[in-house]
Amino acid sequence: MIQYSLICENDHKFEAWFKNASAYDVQSEKGVLECPLCGTRTVNKALMAPAVGKKSNQKAEAAPQKTMALSAGHPEQQEVREALRRLRSKVESEAEYVGDRFAEEARKMADDAEQKRGIYGEATAEEVTSLIEDEIDFMPLPRLPEEHN
Ligand SMILES: [Zn+2]
């Protein structure tokens, strides 16, 4: 399971779960993704900035946040993919890889500010769900299409 932040043509942001990255692509191409707020089917993936504050904190959510939407086949897609690749390699060079202990380490960091550091790793769908329920901030790392090769 993978969670994406999506944004519609009217700037409504919402989250949706997909089985995997290509499930998103398929649904996006078929135009079956729908904004839950206004019902438009012009919906794109929003690139996520690191989350600020807790979900319950409306002020933090209203803070200016850089988002970029990307439609499949758009000429800038290559550029965006390049940016994602740079983001990934930055994370991979600066953050500590914690493998499948990601959820555990993220929890520790949420409990103790002194533990805060950059980490990345893998989490199961259950772990991801429970991190979201506990309002622990994390950011899914985008997978690039060529990684499936
Ligand atoms: Zn909308």
Image (cartoon, helix red, strand yellow):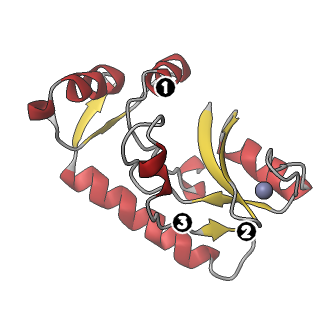
Q: CA distance from mark 2 to mark 1?
A: 26 Å
Give residue 81's quadrant in the image.
bottom right
Front residue of 91 and 17: 17
Type of the residue with mark 3: Thr
Residue identifier under label 2: 71
Q: Which marked residue is nearer to the observer: mark 1 or mark 3?
A: 3
Q: In front here: 125 or 134?
A: 134
Q: Residues within 10 Å of mark 3 (few under 14, many from 20)?
A: some
Dot 2: within a 10 Å radius of its alpha carbon, few (fewer than 14), some, or many (20 or more) residues?
some
- Of residue 41 and residue 119, the one placed in the foreground of this image is 41
Q: The residue tagged with tag 2: helix, strand or loop? A: loop
Residue 32 place in picture, x, y as percent: 90, 49
Q: CA distance from mark 1 to mark 3?
A: 22 Å
Return the x and y of residue 49 as percentages of the image width and height.
Answer: 43, 57
The quadrant holding residue 30 is bottom right
What amino acid type should be assigned to the residue bearing mark 1? Val
Q: Which residue is mark 3?
A: 67
Verify CB contact (< 8 Å) between mark 2 and mark 3: no
**Ligand 1 within 8 Å, label 3 CB:** no
Image check: 32 left or right of 88?
Answer: right
Assign a secondary structure to mark 3: loop
Tell which circle, 2 or 1, labels the residue nearer the N-terminal end.
Answer: 2
